[in-house]
Image (cartoon, helix red, strand yellow):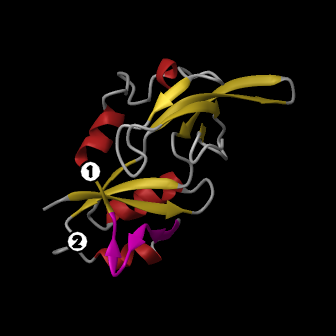
Amino acid sequence: MDKWYVAYTHVNREAEAAIHIERQGFGTYLPQYLKNRRHARKSDWVRRPLFPRYLFIKMDINHALWRAINSTRGVIHLLSSGDGPTYVTENVVEGIKSHENENGLISPEIVDALKPGDPVQVTAGALIDKIGLFRCRTDNDRIIVLFNLMGRV
């Protein structure tokens, strides 16, 4: 059964890794958004990965030669626990895809919806139902949220 997995890539080589992984017969998904880039008094819009250095890969690890992905150009390794890669639920990927516009980009209003100090609530995982404060979003630190755990922020 096909599931989504995540590859950790070299810096700025997500798209290259996706091309090489697709050539091996795997499906990939690289969510992107438009970022305003400013340099030398010029400004333009460029596609940037929503999650820098990460790429979703769809495969069936019971039938695929998935270990080859670890030596694919642009890839550092698959995110793993124990002997095999760790999968991501279909809901996570479909949730991200649901925010894409007609150009296949994550809508800017979704990317820029949170402002510093906005409260956020975790809806899944180890910190489910915990409430924190959104601090910032950058390409290096995708999202920083402050949580009050054990009486400390």
> In the structure shown, which secondary structural element does the residue marked by tag 1 occupy?
loop
Residue 46, picture quadrant: top right
Q: Residue at 45% of width from left, 22% of height from top?
A: 107
Does 1 sit above or below residue 85? Answer: above
Q: Position of residue 78 (x, y in %)?
A: 42, 68
Q: Residue at 47% of width from left, 23% of height from top?
A: 110
Q: Residue furthest bottom?
A: 83
In the rendered structure, the answer to whether residue 111 lies left or right of residue 138 reads left
Q: Nearer the viewer, residue 7 or 102?
A: 7
Q: Position of residue 25 (x, y in %)?
A: 26, 64
Which of the numbered marks, if any, corresponds to residue 61? 2
Q: Residue at 30% of width from left, 74% of height from top?
A: 66
Q: Nearer the viewer, residue 86 or 118?
A: 118
Q: Nearer the viewer, residue 21 or 114?
A: 114
Specify the segment rendered in magenta: 75-86
Which kind of residue does numbered mark 2 sit on? Ile
Q: Which residue is mark 1?
A: 89
Does 143 sit above or below residue 55? Answer: above
